Image (cartoon, grey):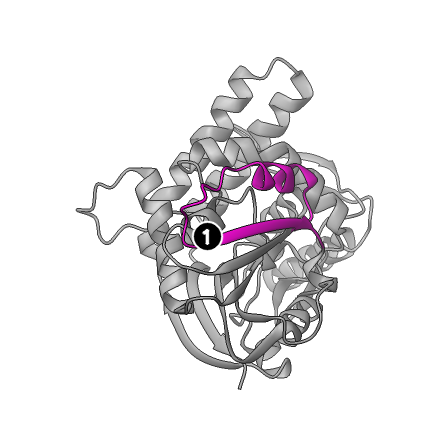
């Protein structure tokens, strides 16, 4: 009787979550509340007894609009960068700016750029990562983003004439890179591929524009293992709200199919974990300070979802992946 009841519940949930207008559980300050699921939300399917998340169909324009609104909050939370920080160990008391700069340095270290090389910044944000790299390496960086606000910020960032390198930024979609084949000696993507609905196309384009011997360094979250009820509903809502979906195989298959060879993967989940409290705190601060009621609710939703996502999902990992074009 009990097993039949469980199967019935699962069937009911499966039917509901594959319906566009079905209610979805959304995290709140004290309780879970139901709201209609938007058409762009992540879909959930069944595989071997588990509810699986499939890719969301958010457009580059929707992702760009999301970052137009959220870039400044991320910047405040993450010390002037918009990616996580890296701490050596629990005793490391580096401030956030130093920690996020260190993650940039570790990406550059894996790229090992030589003087005069051309690098591609995939999802350049507001240009802080490129600015850090050209301050230490005599390279030319081209950054792309689907956020016009980020591109404007990046292009208005000062570049003193005595810098070793230079950087330029443009509005472009990484899933349709507007560059000729073999244009770049290296590329990096920091927390950007997760926002791309067609990861195969994005990685294929990156591989296409890399020259032989060129490296791609990815710094990214991914899921290791499958989610069971009830976490899948919350994760689908996080996918829909934050406009992302996560790889479950560290992009290995897509990289190989694009003709790239994976040469290293390093899990740094514990080294970046300290970033998350700062991000959640920044969302809550924004909710308290924003006089627009609808915007304040958006920040509160971000904080609630982020607090669960970053703090209560053991399958969530973060790592560096390096691949090379033979």
- Which residue has dot 1 on it? 313
Q: Going 53% across and 23% down the picture, which residue do you hit? A: 286
Q: Quadrant of residue 198?
A: bottom right
Q: 322 left or right of 55?
A: left
Q: Residue 259's spot in the image, x, y percent?
A: 61, 84
**Given the current orientation, which residue lies at the most extreme bottom position?**
326
29, above or below 324, in the image: above
Q: Judge whether residue 154 is colored magenta.
A: yes
Q: Residue 180's spot in the image, x, y percent?
A: 71, 71
SS for callout 1: loop
Highlighted magenta segment, given as a residue range = 145-172
Q: Going 52% across and 31% down the picture, which residue do you hit? A: 73
200, above or below 44, in the image: below
Q: Is residue 175 visible?
A: yes
Question: In this orientation, which residue lies closer to the viewer: 28 or 163?
Answer: 163
297, above or below 113, in the image: above
Q: Residue 171's spot in the image, x, y percent?
A: 70, 49
Q: How many numbered marks appear?
A: 1
Question: In this orientation, which residue lies closer to the viewer: 20 or 122?
Answer: 122
**Given the current orientation, which residue lies at the most extreme top position?**
291
**Given the current orientation, which residue lies at the most extreme left position?**
91
Q: Is residue 230 visible?
A: no
Question: In this orientation, which residue lies closer to the viewer: 213 or 221?
Answer: 213
Q: 177 left or right of 134?
A: right
- Say few, some or many: other residues with alpha carbon within 10 Å of mark 1 (under 14 / 14 to 19 / 20 or more): some
110, above or below 29, in the image: below
Q: Residue 315's spot in the image, x, y percent?
A: 46, 60
Q: Going 48% across and 22% down the picture, which residue do you hit? A: 285
Q: Judge whether residue 80 is colored magenta.
A: no
Q: Going 33% across and 39% down the picture, which residue do you hit? A: 96
Q: Quadrant of the N terminus?
A: bottom right
């Amino acid at each position: 009787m009990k097993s039949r009841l469980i199967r019935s519940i699962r069937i009911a949930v499966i039917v509901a979550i594959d319906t566009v207008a079905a209610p979805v559980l959304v995290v709140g300050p004290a309780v879970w509340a139901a709201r209609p699921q938007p058409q762009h939300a992540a879909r959930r399917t069944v595989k071997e007894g588990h509810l699986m998340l499939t890719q969301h169909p958010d457009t580059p324009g929707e992702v760009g609009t999301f970052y137009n609104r959220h870039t400044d909050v991320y910047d405040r939370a993450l010390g002037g960068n918009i990616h996580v920080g890296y701490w050596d160990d629990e005793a490391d008391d580096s401030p956030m700016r130093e920690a996020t700069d260190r993650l940039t340095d570790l990406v550059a270290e894996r790229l090992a750029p030589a003087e005069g090389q051309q690098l591609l910044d995939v999802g350049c944000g507001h240009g802080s990562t490129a600015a850090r790299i050209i301050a230490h390496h005599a390279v030319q960086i081209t950054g792309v983003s689907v956020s016009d606000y980020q591109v404007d910020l990046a292009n208005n960032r000062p570049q003193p004439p005595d810098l070793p390198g230079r950087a330029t930024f443009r509005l472009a979609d990484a899933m349709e890179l507007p560059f000729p084949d073999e244009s770049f000696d290296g590329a990096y993507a920091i927390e950007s591929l997760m926002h791309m609905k067609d990861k195969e196309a994005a990685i294929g384009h990156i591989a296409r524009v890399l020259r032989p011997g060129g490296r791609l360094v990815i710094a990214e979250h991914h899921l290791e293992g499958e989610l069971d009820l009830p976490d899948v509903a919350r994760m689908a809502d996080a996918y829909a709200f934050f406009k992302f979906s996560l790889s479950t195989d560290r992009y290995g298959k897509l990289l190989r199919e694009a003709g790239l060879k994976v040469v290293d993967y390093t899990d740094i989940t514990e080294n970046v974990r300290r970033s998350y409290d700062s991000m959640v705190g920044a969302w809550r601060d924004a909710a308290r300070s924003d006089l627009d009621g609808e915007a304040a609710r958006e920040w509160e939703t971000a904080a609630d979802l982020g607090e669960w996502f970053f703090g209560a999902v053991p399958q969530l990992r973060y790592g560096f992946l390096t691949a090379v074009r033979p």
